Amino acid sequence: MILSKLVLLKYQFVISSLDPVEVYMLGIEINRQSEVSLKRQIYHKLRDYILDGRIAAGEPLPSTRELAKDLAVSRNTICEAYDMLLAEGFVLSSQGAPTRVAEGLSIPKESSEEFLQKESQSYDNIKADFRTGQPDLRYFPRYMWNRILYKAMDEMPLYQFGYSGPDGLTQLREEISGWLFRSRGIKVDPCDIFITVGATYGLHLISGMLYEEGKEILMEDPCHMGMLRALRNKGYPVCPVPVDEHGMIIEHLDGKAAWAIYVTPSHQFPLGGILPAGRRAGLIRFARENGIYIIEDDYDSEFRYCGEPIAPLYSMDPQRVIYVGTFSKVLFPALRIGYVLLPRQLHKKWRYLRTHTDVQNPPFEQAALAEFLRSRKIDRHVLKMKRLYGERRKALLLALAEQFGNTWHSWGDATGLHIAVEFPGMQFGYEFLHKCKTNGIILKSVEYHSICKGKHLDKLLLGYGHMEIDEINKGISVLNKFITSI
Amino acid sequence: MILSKLVLLKYQFVISSLDPVEVYMLGIEINRQSEVSLKRQIYHKLRDYILDGRIAAGEPLPSTRELAKDLAVSRNTICEAYDMLLAEGFVLSSQGAPTRVAEGLSIPKESSEEFLQKESQSYDNIKADFRTGQPDLRYFPRYMWNRILYKAMDEMPLYQFGYSGPDGLTQLREEISGWLFRSRGIKVDPCDIFITVGATYGLHLISGMLYEEGKEILMEDPCHMGMLRALRNKGYPVCPVPVDEHGMIIEHLDGKAAWAIYVTPSHQFPLGGILPAGRRAGLIRFARENGIYIIEDDYDSEFRYCGEPIAPLYSMDPQRVIYVGTFSKVLFPALRIGYVLLPRQLHKKWRYLRTHTDVQNPPFEQAALAEFLRSRKIDRHVLKMKRLYGERRKALLLALAEQFGNTWHSWGDATGLHIAVEFPGMQFGYEFLHKCKTNGIILKSVEYHSICKGKHLDKLLLGYGHMEIDEINKGISVLNKFITSI
């Protein structure tokens, strides 16, 4: 329980702007149980009175003896509070004269803005949750991870507690190089690997490095809205390039004045196509002819269910392609570790920019991840999750067939944590999404992720990675009932 | 030991651009000990040959049977490698016909850029290290911290492993509110506190929110070069405002078209002044009149040796001042946790921008820090370090007096981890700093941190936080010998 005591300060003073005979009592409330020292409480109150004009410029403060007596505190406490006011220039002191309030301090309170209502994010009444890009966190071996992280912290050299530079931990860069070799068959020099805090951040920094005024960045349309917003937030104009079942249609690139191309060639988001080798070669030719870079976002291609992961575009030209990878989907999003593979000529610029943006990643998770990679625990985890997600994918397709007959077909390669499903003749616009939400169904449409609207109105995105099979079955049944009801 | 075996592929083919009678042998090197599967190794080699034109467009691949025999692998392995090439569009297949290489794939290697020499950062021959802003990491209670972090991870709710939003952990925001009350006597609603990955990042995002084209940001001159570069990197013009022994001289603000003011009022970096209350009020009036915000960077004011920490400017007008705080100096830089106190009307914009820049902090260190604050371990740590740093500061001043007599005087308030020292008549320009470096003395001058050069040539910055007293004594002696030698 906190005890507080209201002490009336008997020292009287006059507010200059009011009738000089009006006299006010100054109440200083001090709390002897508070963790804030008494001197600070007193200082604080006096300062407030000076700022709001209740003690006017030129007025003397009460004598330390008098105020000490009134507040029943030691005189030393009052002296210390006055010293604080003096140090910060609220009061002036000259030998022999009383301490007086400095000039020009009164700043009346501005009327405070209306409190912004916190956006309601209530997911109370969820009947089906088809969000995309959600790995199943329940299967992550967190106790094993915690032990690894603890050991990493324990063994961390002391200098790593200070500033250790923008590149990332050497052992992690080496282990990622090994991981890329094992999982995607590409050989990458660890010194080309730069650790980030995730793919969104990677795009943020890369676009900051490459942007040229008067030119556009070429983006797949549809694309991930988050990535589009990340670019538009920075005021960078975006040029949409249409996507078909194979990915970006490169014929649309001709004649564009671009500073970069952003693609998801291993598993186009959201439609799921694998960019064919011919288009890949065409992309690289276009980039070379225009002297620009290709940003390759590989967000979930570890989870390919009907074959090996697709080789990155990066492997076709490591000096023209910037590869953006992340462990958010493979391990868990809150890890906040991703990486970029950078052409040599961008290394210096990246280091400079990173140092002056957010300095570096924390080293602890990096060291733990390095060990998770080194000990091949990641390989086992990916294998386990791939099996699990693959079963869920099958279950989703089966549930769709059972509930919707042959009124639909799926798009794209069997990869990742979501499927794009086309329902010919249907229209999934904003009104539909809004109705879904109010009916407890969380999902997005391809239309939502489209830059040029109206071309993909008949396609829904169904994320399944985070759902158990019975949740999938129930969800599709709920969706069917909802769609037939509207 | 890795065994590798060179297998000569006897399948012969013709490079179209060369004399058609020239026949090449294709060597596929496979490594049976490799972690990369045989199918991927074979796929990879074939793909390279297709890309560099060694297998030309339209050429058939060898039959799977033949290649399997030559490489002494199962035919299934070859089929799977071919499937990978097919999936990615490198080859085309039609029933009955051999698998042929697709058109338009050949992209010859671009001549690779010269490898950029890694910047040499050798600190081999250091005789004195007066870097600023370096807390002494040796005294951080890391084993206690590790235990707290382990417990925090262990108890972390599962949903925190996913995406948990841009604001930061609720319990940390509440504990920072309490910490601000205990350490600086200000009451802040936890919902006004937003967690960041450090002060530099805070400035990065804030400036992104506030920037207006055609206007400048007003900055103290001298100021922290890192912060200046962070703004200039983004292409934001900076208007320097001169600083005297008390901080920014606000008379210089008049008539400036600004989108924000950046100040370090509790302990001006690098000169050390405390901004007097009159100038604080003037700053706020200027900000109100111009409808702009003040960015207050409080980087090390916890360590004030001759009194209480200075109250933040923020407390004078929480709707006009954005306060940027960090735990980098109080705890350790690699923690990567800071915070900003934001006026209500900026909350929404901040959330949107953070979500699309780097999404969020990892939750684990946040939870550990919350516990470190809750259990008051931070109070004890700060008290301990303040005593330690205070002694080092005294030792530094004493060593200066012993070595340099009365040829110098120190600037600023007794706060933080460095002192600005003026040596009247001396000139510490870039040449001096360079000579220092080559002589094993790491330090910066005030000139280095100046926007308008030439005004503070006679001042050095001596960081002492990370140095033991005997290191300080030795360092000042080395500095004295060096200065008298030039």
Image (cartoon, coloured by chain):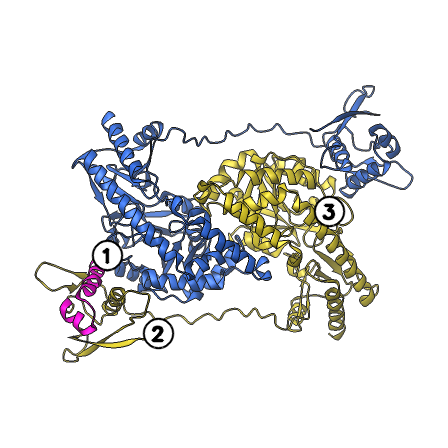
Chain colours: A yellow, B blue
Residue that numbered label 1 is attached to: B276
On screen, residue A47 versus residue B180, left or right, reads left
Q: Where residue B211 sits in the image (x, y, percent)?
A: 42, 54
Tell me the distance, in whole angstroms, between the alpha carbons under discs 1 and 3: 63 Å
Gap between marks 2 and 1 measured at Cα: 34 Å
- Quadrant holding the N terminus of chain B: top right
Could you tell me the amino acid type at mark 3? Ile
Q: Of all residues shown, which one is farthest toward the bottom?
A: A22
In the visual, does A285 lie left or right of B142?
A: right
Measured from the top left, where is residue A116 in percent x and y? 46, 70
Q: Nearer the viewer, mark 2 or mark 3?
A: 2
Q: Does the image show residue B342?
A: no
Q: Which residue carries the number 2 mark?
A: A2
Q: Up-down: is B388 above or below A129?
A: above
Q: Closer to the N terminus: mark 2 or mark 3?
A: 2
- Of A108 and B482, nearer the camera is B482
Q: Position of residue B180 (x, y in %)?
A: 36, 61
Q: Residues within 10 Å of mark 3 (few under 14, many from 20)?
A: many
The residue range painted magenta reads A63-86
The amino acid type found where label 1 is placed reads Pro
Give the residue furthest to the right: B96
Can you tell which of label 1 and label 3 is closer to the viewer? Answer: 1
Q: Tell me the quadrant of the picture where the C terminus of chain B can be found.
A: top left
Same chain for labels 1 and 3? Say yes or no. Answer: no
Please, what is the three-letter code of the amino acid marked with disc 2?
Answer: Ile
Residue carrying label 3:
A274
- What subunit carries mark 2? A
Horizontally, is A447 left or right of B292 in the view?
A: right
Provide the secondary structure element on which disc 1 rests. loop
